Image: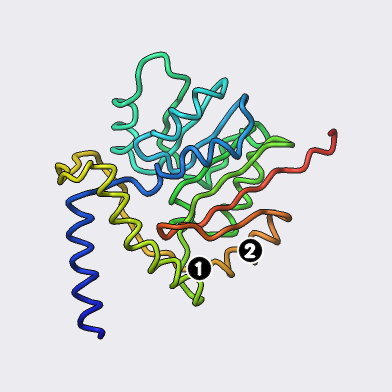
Amino acid sequence: MAALTDRVLRALERFNAAHPWDHNAHYHRWILRQLPRRLDRALDVGCGSGDLARLLATRATAVRAVDADPAIVARARELTAPGTRVTFAVEDALADTGDDGSHTAVTCLATLHHLPLAPALARFRDRLAPGGTLVVLGLARPDTAGDHLLGLLSIPLNAATGWLRNRGRPAPRPVAMTAATRDAEETLAEIALVAGRILPGARIRRRLFWRYTLVWRKPDPGS
């Protein structure tokens, strides 16, 4: 049975390599639904090639998109049309940039597991304005039966999504630059425990395609 499972997984890996799609972009529209229709200043942490930052710019007065990788930031700038309300910067996500309390939205996609969890969540909290919204799409280490079941369910759905998005045809290997990857260390329970201490009331949910979401609204004493 183990050998059969191994062969199935390898076959799926080959299929997914031929029919690739962006698991994070799959959640972009969902992320936008968690945010107000109009934003003042938005911050996208770990922006990659800038796809979400450009979407945020359709709602925000200004978007600051940051990534620690200079080559990826350069690529994001190349892909962004002149006049788009996005500023890309090479920046450490935990850096003190003097902009605390100034963002109505902070987003972080598939980046939090690269950072020390508690300091990163505290930094995101501090950079939000009162009433602002934090949205995280993250990766957690599978731990419970529910985690493994959702992971197994994601395998055929992942293949089906890749097939449909590529209209059944093998796609050329993408040339876009991607950041170095690493496995998540914390389980969802561990993430929820830390988030509950730093972001009281945060909503955390398991999601398909090996992701979870965290949404938190910063209290506004004046509202």
The correct choice, above or below, for 151 with respect to 174 in the image is below
Residue shown at the point (18%, 74%) measured from the top left: 7
Query: Residue 128 placed where, x, y %?
Result: 65, 38
Left or right: 196 with respect to 115? right
Q: Where is residue 139 drawn, in percent x and y?
A: 45, 59
- The answer to whether the residue labelled 2 contacts the one labelled 1, judged by CB atoms less than 8 Å apart, is yes
Q: Is residue 134 left or right of 80 when viewed as pictured?
A: right
Q: Residue visible at 54% across and 23% down? A: 62
Q: Residue furthest top?
A: 83
**Hey, which residue is sitting farthest bottom in the picture?**
1
Q: Position of residue 18 (x, y in %)?
A: 17, 51
Q: Amino acid at mark 2?
A: Val
First-in-chain label (2 vs 1): 1
Nearer-the-camera pick, 218 or 98: 218
Tell me if residue 119 comes above or below residue 217 in the rendering.
below
Q: Residue furthest right?
A: 222
Q: Amino acid at mark 1?
A: Glu
Picture disc at residue 89: none
Query: Is 101 rendered above or below residue 122?
Result: above
Question: Residue 61: which quarter of the image?
Answer: top right
Residue highlighted by disc 2: 194
Quarter holding the N terminus is bottom left
**In screen coordinates, is 103 left or right of 10?**
right
Rendered residue at 62%/48% (across/down): 215
Instruction: Estimate the spatial distance between the alpha carbons at disc 2 and disc 1, rounded to whole Å.
Output: 10 Å
Q: Secondary structure at mark 1?
A: loop
How many numbered circles does the render carry? 2
Asked which quadrant contains residue 221, the reply is: top right
Circle 2 SS class: helix
* Tag of residue 186: 1
Q: Nearer the viewer, residue 83 or 147?
A: 147
Neighbor class of circle 1 (other Cα within 10 Å; few <14, some 14-19, many 20+) is some
